[in-house]
Image (cartoon, rainbow, N blue to C red):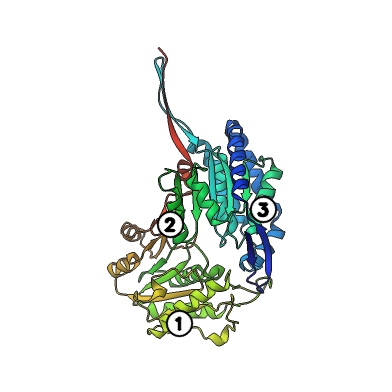
Amino acid sequence: MTITCISPIDGSVYATRETLSHRDADAAVARAKVAQTAWAARSLAERIALVQAGVAAVGAMNDDIVPEIAWQMGRPIRYGGEFGGFKERATYMAEIAEAALAPIIVEDSDQFRRVIKRVPHGLVLVVAPWNYPYMTAINTVAPALIAGNAVILKHASQTPLVGERMAQAFHAAGIPEDVFQNVFLDHETTSSLIADRAFGFVNFTGSVGGGKAMEAAASGTFTGIGLELGGKDPGYVMEDANLEAAVDTLIDGAMFNSGQCCCGIERIYVNENLFDAFVDKAVAIVNGYKLGNPLDPETTLGPMAHVRFADAVRAQTADAVSAGAKAHIDPASFPEDGGAYLMPQILTNVTHDMRVMREESFGPVVGIMSVKNDAEAIDLMNDSDFGLTASLWTQDAARAEAIADQIETGTVFMNRADYLDPGLCWTGCKDTGRGGGLSVIGYHNLTRPKSYHLKKA
């Protein structure tokens, strides 16, 4: 099977790669398992140093990586790629590794040594998405390697060069080739490997359908799985919010990367006293964007990663307008060709009967609703199949935390949005998935507890 990356810039074939046969995939797994034993036997300090060197080697490639990202998935070069977040996450996980992986000593006396150690699963499969291809991959790759696992990375077909870049950098830094492998696999081979217990742990970031396929493949194997799937993240602006900051942050969270953010803002609820002013300011911000070729430094909004993604958002928007929603952005201001280049849109007069307020959009469209009070906002925020993040805007931290306690999400922000803090567990609930990455908990999920009960006398 051939994997083909169609560039959203011009519809050309940007890259093709052949997938591994099942036999070759089995061989890659076998090599990784052999290499993992020696890798885990190295000191934690050595593994940390090698991973950090690999991260630095990726950074040295950034001038080449930035335009590659634009060609593969459409993000404008003006934003400079992902190395800042890539390095931040890997560095934090390196800094906490010793404490996170430290044994729990229950007793160490003349009679007994009783201790719980954290040991690697062995081989970890990382299936990474295209929207933030470097940052999403490093979330698991760095701590998995530091913890003593071998890693096989299967990247999205839209961003095939990313895994190759990471492998090139990590191998040059001294991480053995069999310890970290980038592979191209079709869905059938991936599912078969999981069903055959090839991996000790699988981390998947992608669609709900993809997550269900992973769980089905792992059924009965007892393989650990971490899933970050869809999202429909809300923002709630209270009557005491800093309006300027709320508009700037929430609209950027809705539109940045053409709306293709795991924790992007897809629906906004605004206190009725601020609603009109919020919408006016939001429209002004969006009207200032420039939709165009992501290789142009003046472009602020590039194409979506694929025509079919853009078409799905067009359909959601059209359905909403036909059902009574009001579109605030004039199409004449953002000429598009009906392909991957999709104009941004702000919708009001929306309801939760509309797909655009219930289904994941993953594009540059956001619905804004007026609410009377916290209770109404909480009900609306929870009226979703997804639960990744929510963004609350108020001057009252106690009020925000009380509301946060009632919201069904993995993360709640106050006065910020669309950010992944590596010190906090990145997790979701409902159809967003299960498990957790980064933080101390990320290490716990990438290892297993092993108890030692040693009687000395």
294 sits left or right of 125 in the view: right
Residue tagged by mark 3? 164
Q: Is residue 202 visible?
A: yes
Q: Mark on residue 250?
A: none
Nearer to the camera, 138 or 241: 138
Q: Residue at x 33, y 58 (%)?
A: 398
Marked residue nearer the N-terminal end (1 or 3) = 3
* Residue at disc 1, secondary structure: helix
Indicate whether 389 appears above or below 120.
Answer: below
Question: At label 2, which amino acid type do we have?
Answer: Lys
Residue tagged by mark 1? 318
Nearer to the camera, 16 or 449: 16
Indicate whether 263 appears above or below 330.
Answer: above
Name of the residue lying farthest toward the left: 375
Marks 2 & 3, CB-CB < 8 Å contact: no
144 sits left or right of 208 in the view: right
Marked residue nearer the N-terminal end (2 or 1) = 2
* Distance of label 2 from label 3 (alpha carbons): 27 Å
Q: Residue at x 56, y 62 (%)?
A: 131
* Residue at disc 3, secondary structure: helix
Q: Residue at x 38, y 70 (%)?
A: 358
Marked residue nearer the N-terminal end (2 or 3) = 3
Instruction: Locate the N terminus and report the quarter of the image it occupies.
Output: bottom right
Circle 2 or circle 3, nearest the eye: 2
Decide: few, some or many residues near mark 2? Use Cα within 10 Å; few <14, some 14-19, many ≥20: some
Q: Mark on residue 212?
A: 2
